[in-house]
Image (cartoon, rainbow, N blue to C red):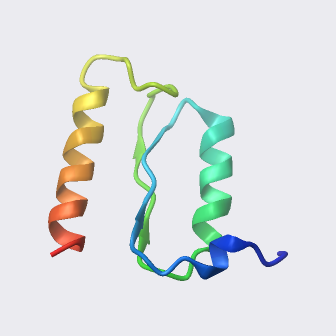
Amino acid sequence: MAETVLDEIQAPTLFIVGGADTQVLEINRAAHEQLSCEKELPVVAGAGHLCEGKGELEEVADVAADWFAATLR
């Protein structure tokens, strides 16, 4: 794969993507694979781009809060 600016990222990186947003999920998976830094790609099952379904946005907030608490100490 061609070298991109993603190869230069050193900061821990969190991607959170809705599972039903297949195009964005594919793009984020490709970017995630290129990173050599600490990284995580949780997928909110069944969620679309805006995570508007019942409990989806709360799941995003919980995942993000847990990740920040564990990663950015």
Residue in the picture at 63% in, 40% down: 24
Left or right of 70 in this view: 15: right
Decide: is 47 above or below 22. above
Left or right of 57 in this view: 1: right
Residue in the picture at 24% in, 24% down: 55
Quadrant placement of the N terminus: bottom right
Q: Position of residue 58 (x, y in %)?
A: 22, 31
Decide: is 1 above or below 61. below
Residue in the picture at 24% in, 72% down: 71
Q: Position of residue 32 (x, y in %)?
A: 57, 65
Left or right of 60 in this view: 32: right
Quadrant placement of the C terminus: bottom left
Q: Quadrant of residue 60?
A: top left
Q: How many marks?
A: 0
Decide: is 64 above or below 51. below
Along the line of sight, the residue nearer the viewer: 20 or 65: 65
Q: Position of residue 52 (x, y in %)?
A: 38, 18
Along the line of sight, the residue nearer the viewer: 23 or 6: 6
Q: Quadrant of residue 54?
A: top left
